[in-house]
Structure formats: C-alpha cells, structure tokens
C-alpha cells in the first residue's frame, strides 16, 4: 500500500489517523476512525481519555501503520487503495500536520455518543438506532458517557481543530449538546461536521448551526419517495427534501460544505444516477457507501444479477450523459462493479465482506456471566452458538500476540476446506484468505465478540451470506494466550484484527 504525499510529515506512514484522531461509539469504545471498528484503543468505562490516547493499544496501532502494516483493523482502506478506489478514509488524513509519533493531543474527534434515532433504516442495527432496539423489544443501550467522561473531555477540547458528530440522529443526542455547550463555554468555535437524516429542522438545529460553522452530510438513499420510505422506515420524504434544501442554503450562506451520504444496495441501485446528478446540481459532495448487510449487498448477487445491475446503470448513465462534478465518482463506482463482476466470472472471491446483524435476528444471545476462560464458559458459548447455527463446526485455538496460531482442537474433518495442521504457525488473515480461495466463495463474518478482559473471543463464519433464522456456517472460538490470566493485558485482541473488511461487534 502506498500513500500519496499530499503534505509533508515528520515521518512516513500508511495512515495518520492514529496520530490525530479519536472516535467514540455509543457503547463507550474509542477507535481511531470510522472504518476501523475492530481495534478499539480502549473504553471510557475502563480507562481515562489520557490513558487511552497514550496507552499501549494506541501505540501498537501507530507502530503498525508506520510499518505499513494494515492488519490491525485497517484492511478496509488497504483494500480500497489496492483496488484503485481513492475514497479510502486513510487518505483524508494526509493533509493534516503530524510533527511527532507521540502526539500529546488528538486534532480531531468524532462523536457517536448515542444511538438515539427516530428512524429504523433497513440496513442499520439496534446498536446505531434506538428505534430499532425499541421495535425489537430490546432495552435501551446504557448511557456510556457520564460526568467523569465530560470532565476529562474538557481538557482535550481546546486542542481540537475539527469535530464530527455521527451515530443515530446527532440532533437528538443530549450528549452532543453537552459537547457543543462546552465548546461555546471554552470559546472554541471550531468547524463541525454533522451527519443527519434530515428529518429535523427544529430551533435546536437552528441554534447549533448559528453557534458553529457546520458542514452537513445528509443521509439519503433515494429520491423516489416510495423507495426512500421502504429503506428509511418512518421517514417523511417530502419533509426530508424540504429540510435538505434549507440545510444546503445554510451551508452556502455560511461558506461550509454540504453533501449526501448514499447507501448503495440491491433495493436502490437504480437511484444512484439521480443521486449523483442532484449532487452535481447542488454543488454537493456525495459518499457512496456499499451496503454489505446480508440480503442487501450487491456483492452477494449472482453473476447474472450483478451483470444486470451493471447493464442497467450503464444504460442510465448513457441517458444522462455527463455527471459534471460527480463524473469521477460515477466512473469509480462503475469500475468497482465491473471489477467485482470480472472477478466473480473468473471464479475469484472479491473479498471478505462485512456483515451486520439482520433486523429481528439475535445472532448471538447475551453473553454468559460465567468466569472468562473457564471450560464451563466455553461449553456454554458453544451451546448458545450452535443453537443459532446447528450445522456449524466449532474450533478452539490459541494465538500469540503476533497473530500466529499456536494450537488448535479442530474436530475431525475440515474447517473452511482446511485441516487443523494448516492453521498452526500461520496468521489468521492468511488462513482465511486460503479458505476463501479454496471454497471459491466469499466468507462472511457474522459476529465477533470479546469479553471484558479482551481474552476470550468468538468468530462466526459463513460461506456465503447468512439467512434469517441462522443455520449453516462455521464457528471459530478464539482463546488468546497473549494476555496474563485474569488480567487486562490489552494485547489480547491483536491476534484477531487481521481479517478483511467486516463488521465487528464487541461485547
């Protein structure tokens, strides 16, 4: 992986996000960016912000990317760059000043402090939408950010040059309002970026826009009202488009940025030409996010189905002719689909695709409270998982902190086309890649859980997309031996971050 030298740096690195950024999720976990959701630097319930920013896991991640090692949860960007896509998140940090490999403070923070949301989007989950959790009969997520967190945050805020607000609907989050109030109190009026679903234009929204120079990103997946209603359950399409116009007018007057976030999936691919054309007409940016939720992803379509999608888009593009400022985006998206189709026809797996929980399906029941690492705990975990996937094979193995597998109790037969001996002495990402080639099918990671001490983990794999109600697949139970028994050695998960582009659900 190579990096475009957009700005001089004190040192070379595949990515500079770990040196400049922190991101908070609704469960209190702290990451370095939105695409690396596998490798948390820490949790605010367990460590202070200073301890997280200067801690071992943060240092390990920085050392990895300086060595152009993208295995610590950074494989999404690696895949994008290697496949000619220029929208890798890693590239967005190239123009930031980085003067030292041991920064005192982050320059950027991304706040997804709450999952409060008034919509139930079909590609979302209860982790990011309180409405989905309510509709599924689940209790609200516990509030992860207490007064102690905000007290710690106060000393970080004056050093920020930029802050982004995501997660649920940001304008519904009281936690976000606390951050905004603190910034005003500190007289630190930095640029903000807010990703909104566009359903709200309230006095609170107006007040926030007046207090800060805000760039706005509108999450909208169709201009056809019926399509939008089917995707974003609970939305009023007319109201969203009305609010979109008002929000755009604000950014024009304020001299800030306005853009769209468009989630591309099987139910709305026909909308992409119109979305790009609107972005061009409005002089807006647009982020095309390929949905990888099972049953919705274009990547899981058959060869004939994918060819039909590509043909339909090409014909629509010919009618439009020119996408203006979005021509490069249009060509990039078509190139990605053509590449996927060519690889599929050649019998090659495209990559390990990200999978999220299907609405209404609890992939893994609530974790046991039995002692971590005990045989009883192991048996209970296997029993719970196999109830969901009765045809699955279960494998326990140990790995050191370099990601090398050291032992396995593979049952008779093969797992993912491999014998147990094929796992020993190899890194997990290499084994998974071999399994993908051997089966000729995409390998879906359904879930990934970690215990509080970061030592016991469970991975569930499917050959092909999962189905509602479960079934099939193969399960890998991971037991790390790198941490100290009964301790909190944060090396415990470094063995399992080398998988390609996937959804990871911790705890």
Image (cartoon, rainbow, N blue to C red):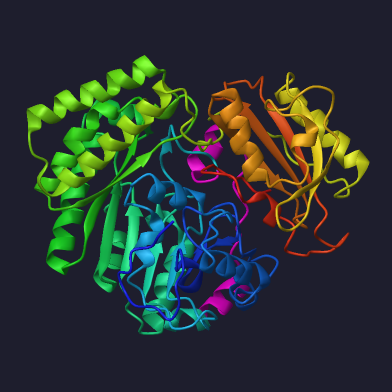
Q: Classify residue 427 as left or right of residue 266.
A: right
Which picture quadrant has residue 366?
top right
Q: In this view, does 51 lie above or below 371?
A: below
Start and end of the magenta stretch?
A: 127-154
Q: Measured from the top left, where is residue 434 in percent x and y?
A: 62, 34
Residue drawn at 8 percent across, 32 percent down: 320
Q: Measured from the top left, where is residue 441 in percent x and y?
A: 54, 25
Q: Classify residue 482 as left or right of residue 59.
A: right
- For the image, the number of numbered tags is 0
Q: Nearer the viewer, residue 392 or 495?
A: 495
Q: Is residue 128 magenta?
A: yes
Residue drawn at 47 percent across, 52 percent down: 35
Q: Measured from the top left, where is residue 126 in percent x and y?
A: 54, 40
Q: Classify residue 277 as left or right of residue 384.
A: left
Say which quadrant the N terminus sits in.
Answer: bottom left
Residue drawn at 56 percent across, 34 percent down: 357
Q: Classify residue 161 as left or right of residue 39.
A: left
Q: Is residue 398 magenta?
A: no
């Amino acid at each position: 992986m190579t990096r475009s030298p957009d700005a001089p740096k004190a040192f070379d690195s595949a990515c500079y996000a770990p040196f400049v950024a922190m991101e908070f999720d609704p469960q209190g976990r702290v990451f370095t960016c939105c695409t690396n959701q596998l490798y948390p630097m820490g949790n605010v319930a367990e460590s202070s912000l200073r301890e997280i920013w200067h801690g071992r896991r943060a240092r390990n991640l920085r050392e990895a990317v300086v060595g152009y090692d993208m295995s610590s949860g950074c494989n999404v960007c690696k895949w994008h760059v290697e496949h000619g896509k220029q929208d890798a998140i890693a590239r967005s940090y190239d123009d930031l000043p980085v003067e030292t490999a041991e920064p005192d403070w982050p320059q950027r923070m991304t706040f997804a402090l709450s999952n409060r949301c008034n919509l139930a989007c079909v590609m979302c989950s209860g982790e990011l939408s309180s409405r989905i959790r309510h509709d599924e009969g689940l209790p609200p997520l516990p509030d992860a950010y207490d007064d102690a967190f905000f007290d710690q945050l106060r000393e970080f805020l004056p050093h920020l040059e930029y802050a982004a607000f995501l997660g649920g609907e940001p304008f519904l989050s009281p936690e976000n309002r606390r951050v905004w109030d603190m910034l005003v109190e500190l007289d630190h009026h930095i640029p903000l970026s807010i990703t909104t679903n566009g359903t709200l234009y309230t006095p609170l929204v107006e007040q926030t826009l007046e207090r800060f120079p805000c760039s706005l990103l509108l999450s909208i997946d169709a201009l056809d009202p019926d399509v939008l209603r089917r995707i974003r359950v609970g939305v009023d399409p007319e109201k969203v488009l009305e609010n979109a116009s008002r929000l755009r007018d604000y950014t024009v007057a304020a001299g800030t940025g306005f853009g769209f976030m468009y989630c591309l999936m099987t139910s709305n691919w026909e909308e992409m030409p119109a979305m790009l054309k609107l972005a061009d007409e409005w002089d807006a940016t647009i982020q095309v996010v390929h949905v990888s939720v099972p049953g919705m992803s274009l990547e899981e379509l058959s060869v004939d189905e994918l060819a039909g999608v590509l043909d339909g888009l090409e014909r629509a593009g010919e009618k439009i002719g020119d996408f203006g400022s979005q021509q490069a985006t249009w060509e990039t998206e078509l190139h990605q689909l053509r590449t996927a189709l060519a690889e599929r026809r050649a019998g090659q797996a495209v990559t390990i695709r990200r999978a999220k929980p299907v609405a209404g399906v609890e992939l893994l029941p609530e974790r046991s409270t039995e002692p971590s690492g005990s045989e009883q705990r192991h048996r209970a975990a296997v029993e719970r998982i196999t109830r969901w996937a009765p045809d699955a094979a279960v494998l326990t193995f140990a790995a050191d902190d370099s990601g090398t597998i050291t032992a396995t109790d593979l049952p008779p037969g093969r797992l993912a086309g491999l014998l147990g001996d094929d796992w020993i002495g190899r890194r997990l990402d290499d084994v998974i890649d071999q399994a993908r080639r051997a089966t000729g099918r995409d390998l879906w990671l359904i879930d990934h859980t970690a215990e509080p001490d970061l030592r016991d983990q469970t991975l569930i794999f499917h050959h092909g997309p999962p189905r509602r109600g479960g079934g099939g697949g193969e399960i890998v139970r991971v037991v790390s031996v790198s941490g100290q028994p009964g301790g909190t050695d944060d090396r415990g998960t470094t063995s399992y971050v080398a998988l390609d582009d996937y959804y990871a659900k911790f705890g």
